[in-house]
Each structure stands twice: as structure tokens, then as C-alpha cells.
Image (cartoon, grey):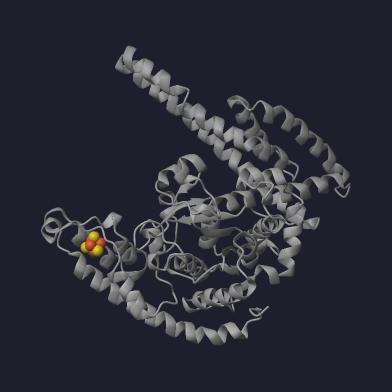
Amino acid sequence: ADDVALDPWGSSTVSDYRKLFEEFGIEEFDEVLDEVPNPHYLMRRGVIFGHRDYRPVLDAMRNGDDFAVLSGFMPTGDPHIGHKLVFDEIIWHQQQGGDAYGLIADMEAHSARGIPWDEINEHSRDYLLSLIALGFDPEAGELYRQSDNDRLQRLAFELGGKANFSEFQSIYGFDGETNVSHMQSVVTQMADILYPQLDDPKPTVIPVGPDQDPHVRFARDLATRMRFFKVTEAFASFELADAERPLVAAAHDAREEYAEDADVPRCGEAAEWLADADLDAAGVLVAESVRESAVEKLENAGMEPLRPRIRFFARQATDEAFEALIEDIEGEKRRYDQHIDAFDVGVDEAEELAREVEAHHGGYGFIPPSSIYHRFMTGLTGGKMSSSIPASHISLLDAPEEGYDKVKSATTGGRDTAEEQRELGGEADKCPVYELYAYLLTGDDDELAKEVYDECVGGERLCGGCKEQAATMMREFLEDHHEKREEAEEVLDSLDIDLET
Ligand code: SF4
């Protein structure tokens, strides 16, 4: 299972994306695709394959409410076509009405990778130029570098107060040799992820590769910790009206009672309690503490314990008895579903109230950030696309002719001979050149992407011509991108970002 270890600074590839769903609880993007207004082609083509809690962002998008998108770039080398996926994701969310943030993770590059500051400055500039050239609107959004953002640093300091070394050990494998700046860069990253919510809590999506998932999980956890820190502080502060105190006490009692022994009927009761209660911020304590075990147990009750019964009856019972049983089960399942719904409504209301109380008491009210995950591009030479292997990627700074040449020398999913290719078809799913078409070259043109695929697997397309076409398109893309980068120079210089020191 080494190949699915999620290490933000490692070089592991992900060979089996399904494991990410099973082992890490990343959800399949397909399940929310229908809810996305006007989905990006990377979503339509399954390049964006997973998400964590993306629905609140989609709801905000559809309802015209505030939401944000943020992602960061570690300036350790030239930006390449793999990074372009993230640029595109940020830009698309900005175009859908989100507050967009692009940040330069210079502290991380320096502390985790040891990149000298002058190189960091140069690479930072290149990242930002490409991001703007591809369509990021810096007037409407915000670009910053970590080391130069005071509000971010203050937030990082506070978040650091909620994290401890043993978590760094278990999440990131830090040990006695890990330098302290690296740890500081981690809390800075946590602050990055929550930064869009500093003024106003809002659903926020972080587009990343799956190797960055540990950061997302940790940030979600810290968001919650910051929140409860503030809410419980508020309760303790005697600033609440006297009338609210019995409710706080009741909440604590109920928490004891339900959280520790949340079996199914009790979860149902808890749900009813929450639905009926005139929910106050205190309700959030109960809601959060039972939510996880409740939902899990309700789901299990709907499925797992009943399966052996189904099998038993299937063997022994008459058809009628079997049907009666199924009806019975479905009735129970509906009942459970209702409980879950009631429960979720209760939790939503409680969360809303908790945020209000917090805002009132000067807290953050963070909403746990959401994330979406894209597939890694395969290197042009096979294997992983890597910044440190120039032939494996096309840099956004490569001369157009160089890009052309790299595509021409890429490995393919083609067969050994043209004859075989005509007979068996090519293996587009294993072909880095096909990836170039699907991830970048065909843009929004689904028909063209499909045509390349169908012709390849149908044996009508041979690799020589296919690469020539892709190489030419790549040359055009780079020519156009370089022109736009030049135009972006002036825009970047007009922004208040220090790229010199
Ligand atoms: Fe790849 Fe094109 Fe060859 Fe198919 S025909 S294997 S897509 S290079």
C-alpha cells in the first residue's frame, strides 16, 4: 500500500485512485458532478476525481452566496503543465463567482526543500505570471506570498497553539530531526487554508493533488478546534444571558448521555431532541459530539446487521415471507433516513448558531474547508511527471519549439508495429500523449478529445501522426501562453507583492 501513502513532501505516485476512497475517505467526484453548474472540462473528464465535502461550495455557487477558492504553489522550480491544472481550477472557481486566492508557499519551499531565497523569488514571479496569463483576475482576487503576509502569520501563530508535536509526528511523520521551520511552515499552511475566512466565514475549496490531503484533513480539524475553543470560551465567559445557562447544562448532560452510548434508538432520540429543541448555540455541543457516531451507526443499522437476516430468509423462507421482510427492512431504512435528515438539519442549525455566537464574541467561526483532487499527469517519459526531470514535463517556460520536441519524443500507449496498432488499437488510457489532449490541448472541446480517444482505441490513429498533431498544438499553446505572460508582467508589477526580498 506504499503507493497510496499520502505524503505532501514525498515523491510517491498514486497508482490506484480507488484506494483513496476506501482508505482516506475521499469521496468520488462523480457523485456531485450533476450538481455543478457548468462543470469544467477537467471535471467532465474525470481528471478531477475526488472531493472532500465539496457540497457547501456548490450550494453557495448555485445560490449566489459567498464562497472562496485557494491554492498554493511551492516555488521550487519552473511552473509546468501539471501545475496548470491547479491554475485552471482556481480560475474556474473565480469565474463562477468565488473569491480567489493564489499563494506562494515560499516558507515551505525554503524550510522543507532548502531552496535559496533568490531562486524562490525568481520562481515565484514565474508562477504568478503564468497564473495571471491563464486568466486569474488579480484585481478581483488576491495573490500573496506566505512570508510577506502579517495577518496570515498571526493566524498561523494562533493555530499553532491548537496543534502539538505528536500530531505532526502522526500526520507527517516528523521526528527529532525535523527542523522547526518546517513545522512552522505547516502551521502557516493551515493558516493559508483558513485565510479566506478570516473576515467572513464562508465555504472554501482547496484544489490540490491527493498527496496534499493530509494538510486538508488537518486544517479541517483545526478549523473545528478553533471554533469550539471560541464557543466554549464564550459559554464560560459569563457574557451569555443567565437564561442560557440551564441550556448549556442540559447540553452537557445530553452529551454525556448520548455521545457515549449512541446506539440506534438513542440516536433517533437525539435527532428528535435536536429537531425539537429550540436550538441554541449550546446545541452544537451535543450535535457535533453525537453526529459522527450517530450517522455511522444509523447507516450500519440500515445495512450491515440486516444482511445476514436477508441471507437467512432467502434460503429458508417462502417468497411471501421474504417480501414481507424486505418491506420491513425498507420501512426501517426510511425511518433511519428520516432520523439522519432530522439530525443533519439540527446540526446545520446548530452550526449556524455557533458561528453567530462566535462572531458575537470575536471568534473566527471557521467552516471546515472543502477540497477537490485531480489526478497526477503521467510524465512524458513514463512514470511520474517531476519538476526535477525536465524531459518528463513541459514547463510553461519552455520555448514553443522545445515543447514541440518533447511531445514528439514522448512515450505512447501505441503498439509495437503499425499493423498491430491497426488491429488491436492503441492504449489511450496508458498514453501520456492522450493525457496531453485530455488535460490540456483540447480545452473545452469534448468532441475532439473523444475523437482522439475513439480513433486511437479503434486502431484508426497511428502514434506518429497523433504526436505530430499534439506537438503542433503544444507549440501553439506555448506561443500563446508566452505572449500572455508578457502582457501579465505589467499587471504583476502593479500589484503590491514584494518579489525582490
Ligand atoms: Fe497515444 Fe495517440 Fe498513439 Fe493513441 S495514437 S497511443 S493517443 S500517441
Given residues 470 and 132, the one toward you in this image is 470
Q: Is the residue 142 above or below the residue 168 in the image?
A: below
Given residues 349 and 212, the one toward you in this image is 212
Q: Residue furthest top?
A: 316
Which residue is rendered at x = 36% and y = 80% of the image? 400
Q: Is residue 282 visible?
A: yes
Query: Which quadrant contains ligand 1?
Result: bottom left
Q: Is the residue 209 above or below the residue 476 in the image?
A: above
- Residue 80 lies, in percent from the top left, at 45, 69
Tell me the quarter of the image containing the C terminus: bottom right
Q: Is the residue 49 above or below the residue 445 in the image?
A: above
- Residue 472 lies, in percent from the top left, at 28, 77
Tell me the quarter of the image containing the N terminus: top left
- Residue 22 lies, in percent from the top left, at 46, 40
Which residue is rendered at x = 12% and y = 58% of the image? 422
Q: Residue furthest front?
A: 177
- Residue 310 lies, in percent from the top left, at 39, 20
Q: Is the residue 73 above or below the residue 122 in the image?
A: above
Q: Is residue 278 visible?
A: no
Q: Quadrant of residue 149?
A: bottom right
